[in-house]
Image (tube, grey):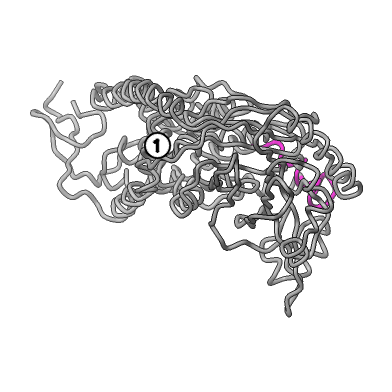
Amino acid sequence: MSDPNGVVGVAGARMTTSSQARPPLVAGKLAEAGAVLSGVLYFVAFAGFDQWWLSFVCLVPLYVVLHGQTTKRAMWLAFLTGLAMNLGGFYWLLNMLKTFSGFPTALCLVFVVIICAYQALRLAFMGWAYGRAANRSWPVPVVFAAAFATSELVFPLLFPWYYAATVHNVPVLMQLAELGGPILVGLVLVAVNMAVAEPLRARLASSEANRKVLGVGVLSLVGALLFGAVRIAMVKAQVAAAEPAQVGYVQGNMGLMQKREKPGEGLRRHVAMTQELRDKGVDFVVWSESAVTFSVPEDMGMKTPFYRERFAGKLGVPAIFGAVLFRADPDRERWFNTAIATNDKGDVVGRYDKQYLLAFGEYLPFGDDFPILYAWSPHSGRFSKGTSFDPVELDIKGKKHAISVLVCYEDILPAFTNHMVAHANPELLVNLTNDAWFGDTNEPWQHLALAKFRAIEHRRFLVRSTNSGVSAIVDPMGGVVTHTKTFVAEAQQGEVRWMRSHTVYERVGDAPWWLLALGLGYASFVRRKSVVTAQPSSSLV
């Protein structure tokens, strides 16, 4: 009898070289159906649908059907998983493209399929790397996990996501993010999936189950639970000992066209709700991305009392709000999606310009090279990237506090946030967002789910103010302290703590996963020479 992955021989067996191909465990349309099933389970487990328990099994069909496949076939099957996952999980892309581009629905639907197909290439890349390494006799479970981690690390996406977000409502499973970010949390889930799949794989292969795969799955889950329970208790104690502050956040709920057509109404709402929060005793307030919709020349906004005289002097508390600045350079006008910080008198005391711009909304890919694209897509912006990672500083009760601001979807980018925190060493993370582009769909909840991990990775509070929801306060354990509903105008307040903490993930970032990616790259091109497979000898009954 051969071992479950065909990597060692046993007595009484005829030994053959490891290059001899093994037949797939599942062939034909059944394999494709299994791949699609994984994709469906994936998006149902994901944030928005929130059947998180499926995160323990949704990769099981894919893991089983990949066994024994050629590299090309493995790539195709994994692509089907990714396509099903994206079409179901990111259904809100249709509304976004209709809003952004102005194209007819049929053409937007074509673009949705194209974007989802591109996003599915992350899984296809995983299947390719798996097929290359597995067919060079490297251990299948290790290869599957390494391909998973590498695909999440290196593949560029228009709308980033991480498998770890499937358990965003289970804080005890999220705490490993302070050691290895969302990839480490995802690897634990992958290990559990492989353990669940192992008895099925063994039955289809007519072999014994691999006890190592079962053991690693169980130990990974138990270890994650124990670590999470211990760290949650420890961080709660640190939170209790930290200096508190009352923060208010305003959700204006202005429609996309309404924001542009009636900027005065949006400003009126934000000022009125901020004054109510001030009267309740908040220490500072946070508004959403581009809450101040009208564009302002850069020098006027930063070097004159424009904001103070227009509205900030009426607030009576320090504030961070989204604005739009522009300047005329010799080559063209440059626009910036900006966060402005003001003191309790309304004077500007800080600024952060968004660096990761949203494709199709704030810029068009290749638009600078082919300007005609902007003529074809008149609703798309043409913003420029910021360059500084410096925090803004607010004077709260006579003491200055450093705050790192993330605009729009920058709060779902772990490496970017890690770089910012390492540079600024802030006491608080703040996110300004406008998710109204995506409608009242799962997207705002998915955005919040992905953002929660930044609070854990850096053990700081995260305050999110969005135009239409979900606005929230997230604690350093990834729990939601307070949050709004979607598409309602409201202001809320809650307590945060000024905290600084240097986690393992902040110090080493994704370095371990880059090393793993290098190892996978080696395994994808170099055969494991010392390995032999065992096949039953003709003399055995």
Left or right side of 254 for 3: left
> Where is 67 relative to 106, above or below?
above
Q: Position of residue 45 (x, y in %)?
A: 55, 25
Q: How many marks?
A: 1
Residue 165, horizontal then vertical, whole percent: 52, 32
231 left or right of 96 in image: left
- Which residue sits at x=89%, y=46%? 264
Quadrant of the rendered image containing residue 92 = top right
Residue 537 position by quadrant:
top left
Which residue is label 1 attached to? 178
Residue 201 in view (yes/no)? no
Q: Residue at x 73, y 33 (%)?
A: 278
Residue 485 spot, x, y in % from top left? 73, 26
Query: As shown in the figure, which amino acid type bears the numbered disc 1?
Result: Glu
Where are the magenta residues, as a range?
A: 90-108
Which one is nearer the viewer's eye here, 193 or 529?
Answer: 193
Residue at the (17%, 41%) spot, across then down: 532
Q: Is residue 316 positioned above or below 474 on the image? A: below
Residue 478 seen in render: yes
Q: Is residue 65 magenta?
A: no
